[in-house]
Amino acid sequence: MTAVDQAGNFHAADAVMARWRHDPHALVQVLRETQAVTRWLPRDLLGHIARTLGLTLAHVEGVAGFYRFFHLGPVGGVHVLFSDNITDRMLGSEVLLAQLCGRLGVEVGEVDPHGRFSVDRCSCTGLCDQGPALLVNHHQVVTRLDPARVDQLADLLLAGVPPEDWPDDWFQVQDHIRRADVLLQGLPNDGPALSGVLAREPSELLAEVERSGLRGRGGAGFPTARKWRACAEAEASDGQRCVVCNADEGEPGTFKDRVLLRRHADELFDGMTLAARAIGAQTGLIYLRGEYRFLLPRLQEALERRRAQGLLGRDVGGVAGLHFDIAIHLGAGAYVCGEESALIESLEGKRGTPRIRPPFPVQRGYLGRPTVVNNVETFVAVAHIARRGGGWWAGIGTPDSTGTKIHSVSGDCERPGLYEYPLGTLIAQILADCGARDAQAVQVGGPSGRCVPSSGFGDAIAFEGVPSAGAFMVFDRTRDLFAVARHFAHFFAHESCGLCTPCRVGTELVVRRLDKLAHERGAGRGSAFDIARLHELDTLLHSGTHCGLGASACNPLRDTLTHFGHSYAQRSTAAHFQPELDLDAHLSAARRVTGRQDPGAHLSTEHSA
């Protein structure tokens, strides 16, 4: 890098840090916006950022190395990332990836010799209803890939055509709302204005949410009112409390929040503002997943409009003393940041490592302040409950699972998209409505959820039945459920934050064992021993990990072993244990370099003598 390049990088970083008021807690945002200009993050640039923000180089390098979307080495001027969810692969993404790399003359993860482009994979981009899909430079999406589109993409990249001059229809994202209920239909036109609802006492708002029976829509199902009340009653040393919206939606197969953010952003902002009123918060933050960067301009415009309308800022909605505003922070590609304490760490400019609890975020969250964290769907539901009443919401669904749930349906079905039903709806009903034929299994709630076999299609989606964070991936009888579980195992191993040994090592051991069973060069490498070891690893990860990621990482393994054991048995045909490592083969290269004989050759010479 020349001195001119270095000076230009430093100048770009200085401008970004000034926009963020040299706040070290904004480090993730500083790195993201700087890299958008510099393309990657050289060590000298990280050192300059560290010095300017008063941080250590080790801290800044540690943060930059944690997130998938930060690059510590050069990438191409156009960086293409293929979405790598299992549903993308079912639609042929790997064949299309190979086609593009072949046309461009690069390998996956490799930069063109002239620095023009690079191609790689990324986790699910939240576009499973219109895949295969890819990201371009982390902020543009291309949907509905096919061989013809990939050929045209290769032509444009080889010709040096910038993404802004690519066909407009490539970037179109459809909402695909197939069945709308109360949330996806939007607020009624004759409902009360937000200002009227905000005028109610905080205790009244809390009581209404409590009456509704609303539980968090992120998967865990914690009662919303109980969380809010705990935050309102927690001691705030500086009098400040925070409301955080988890819009990370990183669970593969989930894309409901993408549509809510596009169509119902005002209900989200209403819900966050109502939460601020209920708990006495002044600060609102939305943690938007990096893959949804294309939604940012529209969201920012909506926030500006609300400020102009007096719905954000000082005395919100005309309520004296209600001072509340919302800012958006972008993630940078880390599944673990969907865990609320890891998300808060990322908001504070750190690696997204889950915290040890207690204290819980409602006691000490963002910057040590009592903090409520809920997801997009939960806050949208609050906007309805505050206007229509807790009793109205409680009258939908079941007594233990009130209200509706939005499902992101993808995979082997005729009509992928969003389906909203009252909780308590049978899995079979959703399958019938989406046009799933001859389904053998459904992955409910994403990889961390449950793999439900056909014998369970009569079960209901509910907290007391089959709980769901929103994903609903359908697999027909042509699919190999072992291959599905193996793909999810690779995902969890890659996404482990590395903090605790059971998760960091355990997920990798699961991958190695499954890879051994899937060994393509020689049937019979797997044995009953390998299946037993997988059961042991499942028990270990479910009982000994630091956070929910490690505990749920073996859910696909456990369910597929239980319900589709034949997929494993047909790969474990060896009569005796077969070692995973062929030590002699691995040492043969070293013997050739040193001129030593292979043991087999030595024995052969002695025998012939």
Image (tube, rainbow, N blue to C red):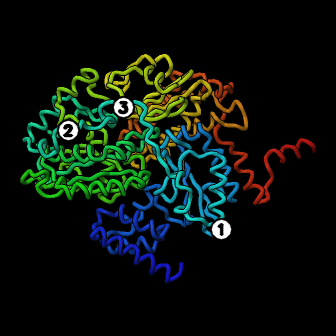
Q: Residue at x 22, y 48 (%)?
A: 243
Give the residue number, with chain letter if any, for mark 2.
Answer: 227
Residue 303 visible to the viewer: yes
Front position among marks 2 and 3: 3
Task: List x then y, in percent, for residue 343.
Answer: 32, 50
Q: Residue at x 54, y 61 (%)?
A: 163
Q: Residue at x 67, y 59 (%)?
A: 104
Q: Compared to 245, does 551 lie above or below?
A: above
Identity of the residue furthest to the bottom in this view: 3
Tag 1 near tag 3, CB within 8 Å: no
Image quadrant holding the N terminus, namely bottom right
* Location of residue 239 by image quarter: bottom left
Looking at marks 2 and 1 on the same chain, the residue that comes earlier in the sequence is marked by: 1
For badge 1, the amino acid type reads Pro
* Location of residue 414 by image quarter: top right
Give the residue number, with chain letter if any, for mark 1.
Answer: 113
Q: Which of these two is toward me, 343 or 89?
A: 89
Residue 566 left/right relative to 219: right
Task: List x then y, in percent, for residue 446.
Answer: 44, 35
Identity of the residue furthest to the front in this view: 190
Label 2 – label 3 distance at C-alpha: 28 Å
Looking at marks 2 and 3 on the same chain, the residue that comes earlier in the sequence is marked by: 3
Give the residue number, with chain letter if any, for mark 3.
Answer: 180
Residue 264 left/right relative to 73: left
Q: Secondary structure at mark 1?
A: loop
Q: Compared to 8, does 203 lie above or below?
A: above
Residue 274 left/right relative to 460: left
For badge 3, the amino acid type reads Ala
Image quadrant holding the C terminus, namely top right
Front position among marks 1 and 3: 3
Label 1: how many Cα within 10 Å (few below 14, some 14–19, many 20+): few
